[in-house]
Image (spheres, rainbow, N blue to C red):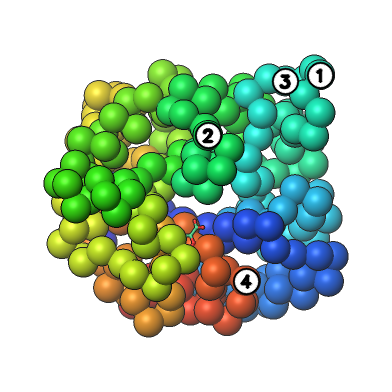
Amino acid sequence: MSVDRPRPLVAGNWKMNGLKSSGEILSALQTSYTPGLKAKVELVVCPPATLVHSFAVASVGSRIAIGAQDCHAKESGAYTGDLSAEMLADAGATYVLAGHSERRQYHKEKDADVCAKAMAAHRAGLTAIVCVGETREEREAGKTIAVVRKQLRGSIPVDSNSHNLVVAYEPVWAIGTGLTPTAADVAEVHAAIRDELKRLVGKADHAKVRILYGGSVKPSNAAELMAVENVNGALVGGASLVAADFLAIAGAYLG
Ligand code: PEP
């Protein structure tokens, strides 16, 4: 591994799954997050907002970071049902997803909304995991690289750096479907993201920004996907709800 390569990060997106009893999954992760694994890979768990505080309290000392799945762009105000980045930071989150494709699809979030949320995350001291990715139709039309570059330009705030930004490439057609792009396809998109980051984050820091791959990552395909150039970890949905699977995915970095 080259000395300049950023420390890999494997993040679990629990989506709308998890009750208080799911603390058992976090406990299992803590037990198996051995010093050897800690040295190789950072783990982040993004439970539903109802569990952020208790998970943050429970994970003190284990070095498993806790993230939220979304935030509002404003600090406070008359936005019933929403949560600000400051509230999530206060609850103990250190990461927050911005622009997951399910937010873009079901809540009609546009790049400008995603950018505002990522800015809010930075304002509150959180690291934003900004998600981008093409639909099946866009891939079939040969528009993947153009779509992803446009999403990055619209979604990444100007104050981004390798500490407050992680990018997740998640082809929409690969999320929850069991389908994945080929390693060559992932390499092509991640190279384009790295190139775009040169302009968006600056030459000095762009190489250190983690670029995660997400979309049907499983123990059986993690090693191949994590070995791709410019893949610095994974954003994991379904498999992150099973501690053994999530750990096996992170274990791809044990070599
Ligand atoms: C996700 O929700 O970000 C995701 C990648 O889901 P899955 O791993 O289930 O495809």
**Mark whose residue sits in front, 4 or 1:** 1
To which residue does mark 1 refer?
78
Residue 132 in the image: above or below residue 113: below
- Ligand 1 within 8 Å, label 2 CB: no
To which residue does mark 4 refer?
241
Q: Secondary structure at mark 4?
A: helix
In this orientation, does residue 82 appear? yes
At a point 50% along the width and 43% down the height, the residue shown is 105
At label 4, the amino acid type is: Leu
Q: Secondary structure at mark 3?
A: loop
Question: Which mark sits nearer the N-terminus, 3 or 2?
Answer: 3
Kindly report the distance in space between the C-alpha atoms of the residues bearing marks 1 and 3. 10 Å
Name the image quarter holding residue 216.
bottom left
Residue 108's disc is 2
Question: Which mark sits nearer the N-terminus, 2 or 1?
Answer: 1
Name the image quarter holding residue 201.
top left
Residue 60 in the image: above or below residue 240: above
Kindly report the distance in space between the C-alpha atoms of the residues bearing marks 4 and 2. 26 Å
Which quarter shows the C terminus?
Answer: bottom left
Mark 1 surroundings within 10 Å by alpha-carbon count, few (fewer than 14), some (14 through 19), many (20 or more): few
The x and y percentages for residue 225 are 30, 67
Foreground of the two, 235 or 255: 235
At a point 81% along the width and 28% down the height, the residue shown is 80
| Labels 2 & 1 near each other (Cβ < 8 A) | no
At a point 72% along the width and 53% down the height, the residue shown is 48
Kindly report the distance in space between the C-alpha atoms of the residues bearing marks 3 and 4. 30 Å
Q: Secondary structure at mark 1?
A: loop
Kindly report the distance in space between the C-alpha atoms of the residues bearing marks 3 and 2. 21 Å
Q: Secondary structure at mark 2?
A: loop
To which residue does mark 3 refer?
75
Kindly report the distance in space between the C-alpha atoms of the residues bearing marks 2 and 1. 20 Å
